[in-house]
Amino acid sequence: MYKYPIIVFEGVEGSGKSFHIKNVEKYFKRINIKFVKLREPGGSKNSEKIRNLILNKKSNFNKLTDLFLYISARNENYTSIIKKNYKKKVILIDRFVDSTIAYQHYGMGINKKLIISLNKAVLNNIKPNFTFLNVVNMKNLKSRLKKRINKNRYDAFNINFYNKVQKGYIKLSKNKKNYMIINSNNRILENKNIIIKKINSLINK
C-alpha cells in the first residue's frame, strides 16, 4: 500500500482504460482523496498543445519525431504536474511510459533502449506504483473504433498494429506484481468492482 501512489491505466484504443480512470476519478471525489489526473499525450497546458500536433489526422510525422514529441509532452507533465504532486497526492495517469514502449517499440520498431534512456532522462527514476492494463480482443476493438465519432491519427492504424501493441503490453506486464490485467471483453460493472477493490488496497481504504 502507498499513501499517494502513481496509478496508471494502459491499453490500446477501445480497451476501456479512459472509462475506468474516469470512474476512479469520480470515486476519489466521493471519498475525498487528494489526487491529480492527467492523460498522455496531454495533461499540462503545453502537453495538450503537443497532443494536438501528434494526434491531428493531417500530421504525418516520422516515427522518431513521434517518439520525441511524446517524450517532450511527458517532460512538460513531469515539470509542471508530476514533480510537484509526487507523494503529496494520488497521481492518476491515462497512459504513461509503458505506452511509449508498447506503441513506439513493439508497434513501430524503435529501439527499446533509446525509449528507456529518454524516459529516465525526463522522469528522474519516478515510476508508477501500480498499472492497470486493459486488454480487448481485436473484434471488439474494431467494433468500438467504428463507433467513435471524433477519431484521431492513432485511431486509424490497421488491426495488425494494435495487435502487436497489445502483445507488447502483455510482455511488459509479465511477472510484475504491480500490474493487473483487466479483460475489457467482460462486463463493465464486473471490471469496475475489480478496479475499485484494488484501488482501495493501494490507498489503504
Image (tube, rainbow, N blue to C red):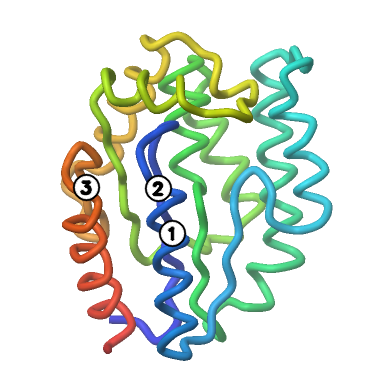
Q: Quadrant of residue 193?
A: bottom left
Task: Name the foreground residue: 197 vs 88.
Answer: 197
Where disc 2 sits, the SS reads helix
Where disc 3 sits, the SS reads strand
Placement of the C terminus among the 4 image quadrants: bottom left
Against 197, residue 93 (above or below) is above
Left or right of 47 on screen, residue 131: left
Residue in the picture at 75% in, 12% down: 60
Q: Earlier in the sequence, mark 1 or mark 3?
A: 1
**Real-space Cα distance between discs 2 and 3?**
11 Å
Q: Nearer the viewer, mark 1 or mark 3?
A: 1
Q: Which amino acid does the dot numbered 2 rest on? A: Lys
**Real-space Cα distance between discs 1 and 2?**
6 Å
Residue in the picture at 26% in, 61% down: 192
Q: Which residue is mark 2?
A: 17
Report x, y in % for residue 121: 65, 50
**Real-space Cα distance between discs 1 and 3?**
14 Å
Report x, y in % for residue 40: 60, 47
Q: Which residue is mark 1?
A: 21
Report x, y in % for residue 186: 16, 43
Residue in the picture at 73% in, 39% down: 51
Placement of the N terminus among the 4 image quadrants: bottom left
Q: Which residue is mark 3?
A: 181
Left or right of 98 on screen, residue 118: right
Q: Which amino acid does the dot numbered 1 rest on? A: Ile
Circles 1, 3 touching at the beta carbon (< 8 Å): no
Circles 1, 2 touching at the beta carbon (< 8 Å): yes
Report x, y in % for residue 177: 19, 59
Q: Which amino acid does the dot numbered 3 rest on? A: Ile
Against 186, residue 88 (above or below) is below
